[in-house]
Image (cartoon, rainbow, N blue to C red):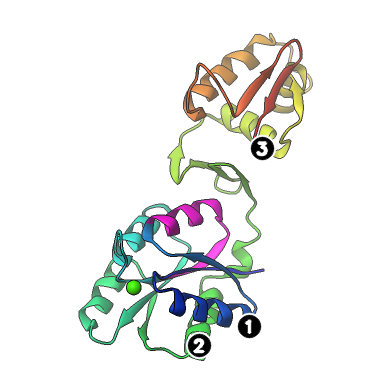
């Protein structure tokens, strides 16, 4: 189902939008503050369109828009502006919004704008990109980009291949031999220690605390496990 984020601190407006999104066949993800919206976008990388109110209790909608655009060029963004905020429309479009809707708006108007954005941004096509999402991590297997809480982590090709193998096999213990043959190929004659060396490097890049890894855990005497 197509996901739409609605960021609005006024609960009655938010619920009104949610009801209408559901009616129009969208799954609605709600946020009442800018920070909550950014968190939910991280957790749901398949959100195709975000509707952002401008006046919010923490960071304003334009700042949210800027931060979203810093990491995602593809998502569609619609700003919700008050009628008196003509200037906001301009600012909103400059910070990377695709469209704006002026309050008060009709549900039909809003869903028509969302439908149009989904069509224009190729929402259907975008869904084909495989995203592997676990905890704070999002791996895009088409662009080969790994993000942790929205920040890109640069990996070597081997590190990327190992991590992809883990993320495709969550909770499964993989022996060093499994990893070696999957990443280096079945005919690879090298030392198993190369697996350990790469995992040590990978942990430095992705773990919160390298001394106590929680994502790639060691299964003593057998191998490693993606622990989320
Ligand atoms: Ca507001």
Determine the secondary structure under disc 1: helix
| Residue at left offset 56%, top offset 56% | 44
Q: Quadrant of residue 194?
A: top right
Specify whether 171 is left or right of 4.
right
| Residue at left offset 69%, top offset 8% | 191
Looking at the rendered image, the quarter that the C terminus falls into is top right
Find the magenta span and give its range: 35-51
Can you tell me which quadrant of the image ligand 1 is in?
A: bottom left
Which residue is tagged 2? 107
**Residue nearest the observer in this picture, 185 or 114:** 114
Dot 3 or dot 1: first in sequence order is 1
Residue 40: within the magenta?
Answer: yes
Which residue is tagged 1? 23
Task: Report whether residue 72 is seen.
Answer: no
* For discs 3 and 2, the disc positioned in front in the rendered view: 2
Q: Does the beta carbon of the residue at mark 1 sit less than 8 Å from ligand 1?
A: no
| Residue at left offset 40%, top offset 74% | 10
* Dot 1 and dot 2 residues touching (CB under 8 Å): yes
Looking at the rendered image, the quarter that the N terminus falls into is bottom right
Determine the secondary structure under disc 3: helix
Which residue is tagged 3? 167
Residues at marks 3 and 1, CA–CA distance in whole angstroms: 35 Å
């Amino acid at each position: 189902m197509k996901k739409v984020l609605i960021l609005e601190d006024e609960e009655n407006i938010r619920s009104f939008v949610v009801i209408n999104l559901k009616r129009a066949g969208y799954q609605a993800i709600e946020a009442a503050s800018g920070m909550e919206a950014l968190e939910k976008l991280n957790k749901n990388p398949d959100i195709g369109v975000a509707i952002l109110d401008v006046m919010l209790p923490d960071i304003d909608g334009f700042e949210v828009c800027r931060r979203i655009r810093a990491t995602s060029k593809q998502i569609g963004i619609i700003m919700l502006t008050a009628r008196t905020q003509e200037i906001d429309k301009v600012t909103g479009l400059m910070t990377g919004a695709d469209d704006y809707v002026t309050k008060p708006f009709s549900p039909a108007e809003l869903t028509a704008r969302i439908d149009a954005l989904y069509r224009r941004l190729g929402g259907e096509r975008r869904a084909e990109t495989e995203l592997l999402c676990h905890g704070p991590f999002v791996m895009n297997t088409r662009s080969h980009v790994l993000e942790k809480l929205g920040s890109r982590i640069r990996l070597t090709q081997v590190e990327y291949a190992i991590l992809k193998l883990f993320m495709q096999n969550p909770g499964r213990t993989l022996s060093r031999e499994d990893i070696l043959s999957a990443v280096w190929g079945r005919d690879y004659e090298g030392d198993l220690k190369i697996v350990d060396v790469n995992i040590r490097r990978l942990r430095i890049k992705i773990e919160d605390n390298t001394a106590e890894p929680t994502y790639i855990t060691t299964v003593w005497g057998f191998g490693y496990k993606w622990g989320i």
